[in-house]
Every structure is written in structure tokens, then in C-alpha cells.
Image (cartoon, rainbow, N blue to C red):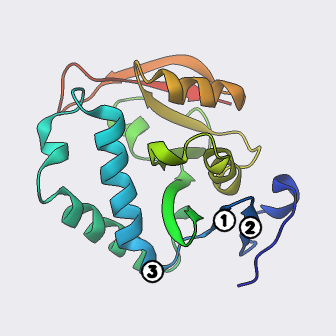
Amino acid sequence: MAAHVLGLKSLFSPGYRHCMTIGLVAVRDAIVGDAKGIARVHVDSWRETYAGVLNERFFSEDVFDRRAAFWSSYLDLSPRPGSLAVAEIDGTIVGFANSGKSIGVDAEHGFPAARPLTLFSIYLLAQSQGTGAGQALHDAVVGDRPVQLWVLQGNGRATAFYERNGFAFDGSQYVDPGDSHLIELRMVR
């Protein structure tokens, strides 16, 4: 897969297999061999962002293995149910984002989907925030399409990022069933 240096909007069109380099950050479609790197970012970014907020079960010793197994299974799917991109710096995965059809969370909590596409996650290691990797990941998996997402109440940094990308709260919220003090809020664009 060749690396490209192009404007994000022109590069990331549906169905285009890609790899792009912006400065030191390379963003590309995830491959099967990325499962452990994605799991490491997933777990470490939870620890960096949600220590003292999330239940301790998110930080247990086996959480990395469970996340690696989950991402390995997801990456083995053919076709995949959505888009999954990784950001690398010097060949190390420092972030990932995934999107797909709006199912699951909305239906589980009694809400009709507000948009056909959901941005399920953008996770980026703290040391890589401010590099443009988060924006590149966002653009890779959702571009400028109508989309919805759920964000944890009080996550100001994520909320500000999403607002810069045209998202606004639509009033829908639910209490996380595993942790009654965690409230998820829906944002749409």
C-alpha cells in the first residue's frame, strides 16, 4: 500500500483503500495484524482519560487480552461491518477510530437512530494528542457525512473536538448500565 500526501477530503472517499502521511502521522485502514496495537491504545487511553471515573474492571490485568481478542475477531470479519482506521507515528499505532451503521446503543436504550452512521470511537494516546492524528482519524472513518456518536458526560476535551467538527447535542442520553454515575450523551451532525 503506497503512502499518499493529499488533502483529507479528497483522499478519504468510501471504498478507497488508503494510507496517508501527514507530518509524522500516518493514517491507514486497519489490518488483521493491528489487533494488539489497537488493544494497547484502547486500554492505555482508557487509563489516561478515565482513571478515577470508570469502574476498576476497565483497568484489570486481563482487560488488554480481552480487548486484543475483540479487535482480532473484528479484524477477521469479511466484510467488516464498518470502517476502522489506525494512526501511526514511527510505525507504532497511537490511535484508532471506527464507524459503522447506527445500530446497537440506540436500540438498546430505546432511541431511534438519529443518523444512519455512528462514530463508535476515536481513541488516541495522550502523548499523540495535538498532532492532527485525531482529526485525520475522524476524517478517515466518517468524513463530512451525517453521523451520530455517544460521548461520556464531562469529557470536555472530546466534546470540544466534536463541536469543532460540527456536532451538537440532541438531548438524548442514557445511564451506563454498568456504572450508574456514567451518563452518555448523543451528539449529531
Q: Which residue is drawn at 43% across and 36% down?
A: 106
Distance in Å between CA atoms under marks 2 and 1:
5 Å
Local crowd size for mark 2, using a 10 Å CA cut-off: few (<14), some (14–19), many (≥20) = many
Residue 50 against residue 72 in the figure, above or below: above
Secondary structure state at the residue bearing disc 3: helix
Q: Which tag, 2 or 1, sits closer to the chain's start?
A: 2
Q: Which of 122 and 113 is in front in this view?
A: 122
Residue plotted at (39% across, 56% down): 41
Of the 4 image quadrants, the one containing the N terminus is bottom right
Query: Percent from the top left, x then y, of residue 105?
Result: 39, 40
| Residue situated in front as seen by the camera: 94 or 148 | 94
The answer to whether residue 112 of the structure is visible from this angle is: no
Tell me what residue is drawn at x 45 percent, y 30 percent. 151
Farthest residue in the top direction? 171
Q: Residue at label 1?
A: 26
Label 1 amino acid? Answer: Ala
Question: Given contact means CB atoms under 8 Å apart, are the residues at marks 2 and 1 in contact?
Answer: yes
Seen at 58% across and 69% down, the residue is 90
- The 10 Å Cα crowd at callout 3, few under 14, some 14 to 19, many 20 or more, is few
Q: Can residue 61 be seen in this view?
A: yes
| Residue 37 percent across, percent down from the top left | 40, 68
| Quarter containing the C terminus | top right
Which residue has dot 3 on it?
A: 32
Between marks 3 and 2 in the image, the one whose residue lies nearer the viewer: 2
